[in-house]
Amino acid sequence: MINFIKSLFSGKGNEEIELQLTAGAVIIDVRSEGEYSGGHIKGSKNIPLNKLADKLESIKKLNKSVICVCASGMRSSQATNFLKRSGLQAINGGSWRSVNNLIKS
């Protein structure tokens, strides 16, 4: 049960995220514009969760896998599930800070 709860907040394992980043995945930060302006992953795209459906076609046109991030992993989990249901390859990266640390290392 504890591992399940951790998985909700932590997103995918570091190895999978690093693999997707190496393969050219796009990072979509689903936090609000205000949260994003307070700090974000360089090169990420800010598409707030409540606007994701409106941007679905433009995300599909990127023709890349997607790593969703937010503050804790809750909104990115919702975004990942939505994108998967829409036919895209997406993974939940969890916290943007965690993914940012992977990029810096």
Image (cartoon, rainbow, N blue to C red):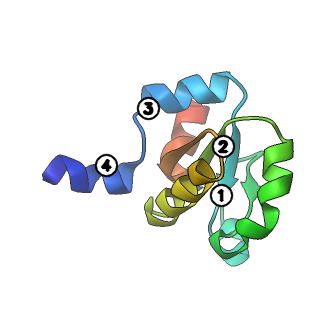
Cα distance in 3D space between marks 3 and 2: 20 Å
Q: Residue at x 51, y 46 (%)?
A: 93
Asked if residue 45 lies left or right of residue 87, the reply is right
Nearer to us of marks 4 and 3 is 4
Answer above or below: position of 82 versus 16: below
State the CA–CA distance, disc 1 to disc 3: 17 Å
Q: CA distance from mark 1 to mark 4?
A: 18 Å
Give the labeled residue for mark 3. 14
Residue where numbered disc 1 is placed: 29
Residue linked to disc 2: 88
Which percent across, then down, holds residue 105? 54, 28
What amino acid type should be assigned to the residue bearing mark 1? Answer: Asp
Say what amino acid the circle numbered 3 marks: Asn
Q: Earlier in the sequence, mark 4 or mark 3?
A: 4
N-term-proximal mark, 1 vs 3? 3
Q: From the viewer's perspective, is the residue at label 4 or at label 2 nearer?
A: 2
- For the residue carrying disc 1, how many other residues have a C-alpha within 10 Å: few (<14), some (14-19), or many (20+)? many
Callout 3 environment at 10 Å: few (<14), some (14 to 19), or many (20+)? some
Type of amino acid at the residue the image marks with label 4: Ser
